[in-house]
Image (spheres, rainbow, N blue to C red):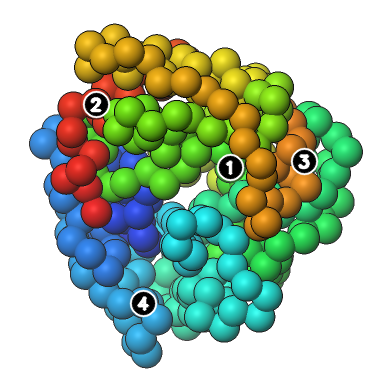
Amino acid sequence: MTPHPPLVVVLGAAGFVGSAVFRELARHPIRLRAVSRRKTPLPHDARADIEVVCADLTQPGQMAAAVAGADVVIHSLAYIAGASTWRIADGDTVAERVNVGLMRDLLRALAERSGTRQPPTVLFTGSVTAVGPTDKEVLDGTEPDRPQGEYERQKLAAERLLLDADAAGTVRGACLRLTTVYGYSAGSTTRDKGIVSSMARRAVAGEPLTMWHDGTVRRDLLHVDDVARAFWDAVPRMDALAGKRWLIGTGQGAPLGPVFTRVSELVSAQTGRQPVPVVSVTPPDYAETRDFRSVIIDSSPFQAATGWKPRVSLDEGLRLTTQFCSSGREAELS
């Protein structure tokens, strides 16, 4: 008898990262379940056997139904806090219910399953910011975790729940801590609220691109399509990855001044209008120390364990992103 292909469940499949992961997985001959509060558009080049589930996972019983029969679960759920994404107030119980409570619900649902031959795999979308303030410019995963913000504390709490469950043998769990993720590609279905796309949006609107510093602050910018491939490459390597956290980035730090200038140039070429200026402005009151520190990610341990490497160069990623915004397609996204 031919065995069934594995069932992979993507939680948060209509979100920014989750939708990219879903599109990547849909290209492979697996069984795939996309779970989100909104309907998830199907990729035109899908090879997977796809099931789409619309569910509010904060409601009783929804999580267990969403992951029933799953061999692999990719957890990309996160609470989004308005314009200043990720920055949530201390003690925000609504955010905690999503960022921590849903991991707790997921692990409980998987632990209560019976008849499985081996523990299911769970991959979690973590964040490199969980390490908290540090004087190190290059992060390699050896840093102690001292998260400062509420979002970072909640992400770390969820991560620890997963790794504790891995240690207990109820799941095979690993956390992929992501650097600054950005970008659009031809198949994008969800709005990117990050800094790069925000600047592309401003350039298309003819508005100046603003910085809270002199433009020398560097960021490790990772295109969302490369994030999606990292999750796909991680699934068959869980013997090496399970029980640990892994940093995911390009290993290159891009000064934001030149990045914004390149965004302005690309939008100008795509629209035929004059490039908008890039200017420094007074930081807002909610700016944090980390906003003025450079961050670069050493992901060589993950690359050695999985064979993954980022494929989208920064210039290509900026071109794809500005082209998507200039075409007006971003306005169609939710």
Image mark for residue 57: 4
> How far apart, in angstroms, are the residues tagged by discs 4 and 3?
31 Å
Looking at the picture, which amino acid does disc 4 mark?
Answer: Leu
How many other residues sit within 10 Å of disc 3, few (<14), some (14-19) or many (≥20)? some
How many other residues sit within 10 Å of disc 4, few (<14), some (14-19) or many (≥20)? many
Mark found first going from the N terminus, 2 or 1? 1
Nearest the eye: 305 or 129: 129
Residue hosting label 2: 326
Q: Position of residue 81 (x, y in %)?
A: 49, 65
Residue hosting label 3: 141
Q: Secondary structure at mark 2?
A: helix
Residue hosting label 1: 178
Dots 4, 1 in contact, CB < 8 A: no
Mark found first going from the N terminus, 4 or 3? 4
The residue shown at (46%, 57%) is 83
Q: Quadrant of the C terminus?
A: bottom left
- In the picture, measured across the screen, residue 227 lies left or right of residue 280, that is left
The image quarter in which residue 276 lies: top left
Relative vertical location of residue 159 with respect to residue 264 in this rendering, above or below: below
Looking at the picture, which amino acid does disc 3 mark?
Answer: Gly
Of tags 3 and 1, which is closer to the observer?
A: 1
